[in-house]
Image: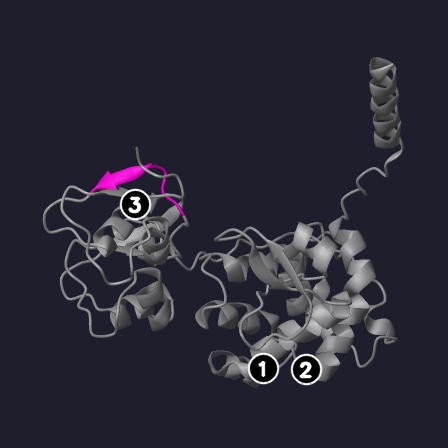
Amino acid sequence: MKTKVYLIVVQLIFISFLQADPQPPKMTREEYIAQYKDDAIRDMLKTGVPASITLAQAMFESDNGNSTLAREANNHFGIKCHEEWNGETHYQDDDVRSECFRKYKSVLESYDDHSEFLRTRQRYAFLFSYDRSDYKSWAYGLKKAGYATNPQYPERLIKIIEENNLHVLDAAASPDDAVYASVSPPVNYKRQAEPITEVAIVEQRKIGELNQTQYIIARQGDTYQTLAKELDLMPWQILKYNDLKKTDRIKEGETIFLKPKRSKAQADFHVLEQGETMRDISQKYAVKLKALYKYNKIEEGIQPAVGEKISLSKKKPA
């Protein structure tokens, strides 16, 4: 009798699985533009951020609206909660487990919040001196202001805009303006060679990668200000990515990361050697310093003993 009941339950589960709604097909780039271009126009007329920039950033960062964050939270820019957020929230793993992301009632609300984010941060203020038709200046300005660490971020946005003729949206006076009614690549469109802004850097300094994080080796006389200028980063990025203070001096031969370090290392643990600090370990394995303190239940600023095993992930060392 129990066996029969068990088989019936299994059959019912199997039938329900077969009847479950399949995953919706992925949205194409063309479908994304057709569905959200009006929202981008409305946002532009309200905030001044070019519609082409909003769409290109949203498409790039949400995988054309197919990311989990976009589908479940209408969040097309990956904006996290931050202290000032009082709206709905969505939690998913990112740099750390179960991070808080903003959840919106509509995609337009996501667009508006993204534009307000740019409007209310001082480091982006200079962008609004550009004409809204000057999408290239906006793209390079976002990188200069520290919006993204990807060295090719401006070129990626410009490529999306030009391949899809999105710049025509920036001339619209309303969502009903016929000037942007047909958004499609121009006939005989031929993409121009993308400018590589990092060539000079590569020629002067070898860029390495550790734990999927790009880095350079500091030279004599380097400071976080000079490196920021040379690498087209903001000074605070050099400090934050490398757990430095403004009063710290950068030493010749020191590893300097160009992007945020990872939340865990590829190795399981490190045995602390004489003269090493927790920051030294953080730089050696490209793992965030705060994460190291957390994994090892050590108060920030406390130095563990020589010979102690330092966990480089949530897994405890044996």
- Which residue type does callout 1 highlight? Arg
Q: How far apart are labels 2 and 3 at the CA level?
A: 42 Å
Q: Which segment is the magenta one?
A: 264-271
Give the number of the disc on residue 47. 2
- Which quadrant of the rendered structure holds the C terminus? top left
Rendered residue at 53%/74% (across/down): 83
Question: In this rendering, would 172 be left or right of 284?
Answer: right
Rendered residue at 73%/55% (across/down): 72
Question: In this rendering, would 153 be left or right of 5?
Answer: left
Q: Is residue 267 magenta?
A: yes
- Which residue type does callout 3 highlight? Tyr
The x, y position of residue 48, in whole percent, is: 66, 82
Which is nearer the N-term, disc 1 or disc 2? 2
The x, y position of residue 230, in whole percent, is: 31, 66
Rendered residue at 49%/62% (across/down): 148
Asked whether the viewer can see residue 242, the reply is yes
Contact flag, marks 2 and 3 (Cβ < 8 Å): no
Which is nearer the N-term, disc 3 or disc 1? 1
Q: Is residue 9 above or below residue 194?
A: above
Rendering quarter of residue 137: bottom right
Q: Residues within 10 Å of mark 3 (few under 14, many from 20)?
A: many
Residue with the most extreme front position: 1
Q: Which residue is mark 3?
A: 285
Q: Secondary structure at mark 2?
A: helix
Asked whether the viewer can see residue 187, the reply is no
Q: Is residue 26 magenta?
A: no
Q: Which residue is mark 1?
A: 119
Contact flag, marks 1 and 2 (Cβ < 8 Å): yes
